Amino acid sequence: MKLSADIKRLERIFLPKEFIVTDWNSLEPWFKNLLEREIGSVEQLRHWLRDMSELEAAVSEDACWRQIKMTCDTSNRALEDAFTYFCMEIQPKIQPYADQLNRKLIASPFTKELDPKLFFTYLRSVKKSIDLFREENIPLQAELSVMQQQYAAIAGQMTVEVKGQEYTLQQAAKFLESHDRSLREEVYRKIQERRLKDQQPLHELYSELIERRNRVGKNAGFENYRDYKFAEMGRFDYTKKDCYDFHEAVKLHVLPIVEKIYRKKKEKLGLDTLRPWDTEAEPDGVKALKPFSNGEDLLKKSITCFEQLDPFFADCLRKMDEMKHFDLESRKGKAPGGYNCPLAESGAPFIFMNAAGQMDDVTTMVHEGGHAVHSFLSHHLELSAFKEYPMEIAEVASMAMELFSMAHWESFFNDKADLQRAKEHQLERTITIFPWIATIDKFQHWIYENPTHTIEERTNKWMEILNEFSTDSIDFSGLEMFRKIGWQRQLHLFEVPFYYIEYGIAQLGAIGLWMQYKKDPKQALQNYINALSLGGTKTLPELYATAGLKFDLSPGHIKTLMEFVNEEMEKL
């Protein structure tokens, strides 16, 4: 099959072409139609499924645009109100219908005639949704959807002044690459002190989120929210024990390499002690990497890089640019972080990020670009539900793209020495992210196993876990008040609970694909495309197998992969 990024908006057959989601009264008749329709054959069932998919796509895209517009400008009250209206007035009314439609599908005698190879994962997911549905959780989930966005509103207003000029925290971070150590320390402290100012509202917001999430889990008959969330996220292929094994493997096989990376950094900078404001710096005389000048330049260079890998990848970005599906630069009032938002009807997703001219922005751009390619590759699938792939493969799409794209980073760097430093930076990041993933994941397990904890108990537990996954190479003395709230910068804790270990699992998959790429680039890219084209129509182990990978979280497997990355770093 020849790949094409000339994606077409899904044609509407069930809904009127000009229909837009405004309120529940205009939307409800379409759900009623599906619920009341007679299904007399497997052909009629498939037709019904296509109509339901079309309705889901229209509603999903509307919700996504509301969220995109709000995160692009958190200071615009009208955009926030539009998002809140959907969460409080439309989504809660959809949920009982969604449950009844799920039950109608499972009860239909013709469901047994659907191709099990194609429908197994979808029907498994539908049954899971039926098991988890509770009427009393609808208002709680609506409240949570709105409350979770308060994090972006608080964090989006955080700025600091450096040399008489105002910067967002993302923009200010570029000063941490300066040769002037006193400036680095000054900016580091300003960023941390700015975070301290809002620690109390974020503590209170998190406590309220935990309380409501705990109620959702209990209402659904689970011992705690963690167990509920594992079921809701469809974690059919691994358990909490696998997560604990992953944490231990990080301590055993990753921390020693992290220790080595920071020891080397200290020697390179000629310092007696490495402080947290030194980790991004370069020795005197070595300029900080400047891979691009602005958002437009970042996109142009990313397209050139992707073109070398596979012209189809570049075409995906070009198509999104043509549709104005990018917001790349950091500015005041914009929510923090970065994401790729799939748009079910348009097909071409939206990339949002906070670029400030740093090397990390290149990584974010190619990472989100990998997600975008995944959206394009799965758009051809018949039903919206088939495109809902597990996060553990979604993050392989993005993290493997980070590693594949390194082979063509000449588009960002003319100078060979800069290119080598950029690759070194990427591989260091590939390793050093593991302890943070383990820290955040282990912290969440404790949080939801102990939902009635006090802020003091939370802080003590955070420090205990943080120290467990920290190396002795960085001297944090005198900075304890900043470290105590370090978790507050992780938006996933507020907005998408338990979505974090996926990055660790996927990084293992990405390293596995990169190993393939070093041996046979063409075959590795084909394996990557084959797996992503399946969307969510196969189980997680099957998707990994299609990519030529083992779905394995064991310490032995992790050790092999870490040794490979370590060897590649040594070569640089």
Image (spheres, rainbow, N blue to C red):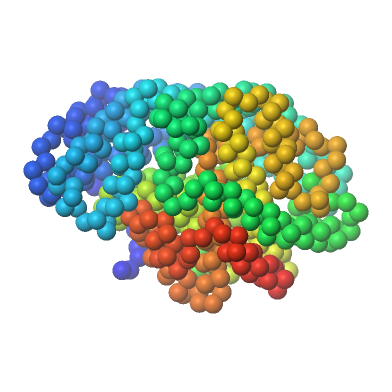
Residue 273, given in percent of the width and then of the height, sits at 88, 51
Residue 163, given in percent of the width and then of the height, sits at 80, 38
Residue extending furthest bottom? 519
Q: Quadrant of the C terminus?
A: bottom right
Depth order, front residue of 375/229: 229
Residue 213, given in percent of the width and then of the height, sits at 49, 28
Q: Quadrant of the N terminus?
A: bottom left
In the image, residue 250 above or below residue 183: below
Depth order, front residue of 521/281: 521
> Is 523 on the left-hand or right-hand side of 192?
left
Residue 466, given in percent of the width and then of the height, sits at 71, 42
Residue 243 visible here: yes
User: Residue 65 sits in which quadrant?
Assistant: top left
> Is 400 on the left-hand or right-hand side of 346?
right
Depth order, front residue of 44/294: 44
User: Residue 447 sits in which quadrant?
Assistant: top right
User: Residue 268 sits in which quadrant?
Assistant: bottom right
In the image, residue 504 above or below residue 52: below
Residue 302 visible here: no
Residue drawn at the location 38% of the way across and 56% of the way down:
539
> Is 250 on the left-hand or right-hand side of 376?
right
Count of picture labels? 0
Residue drawn at the location 33% of the way across and 44% of the way down:
125
Residue drawn at the location 57% of the way across and 64% of the way down:
557
In the image, residue 518 above or below residue 229: below
Residue drawn at the location 50% of the way across and 27% of the way down:
214
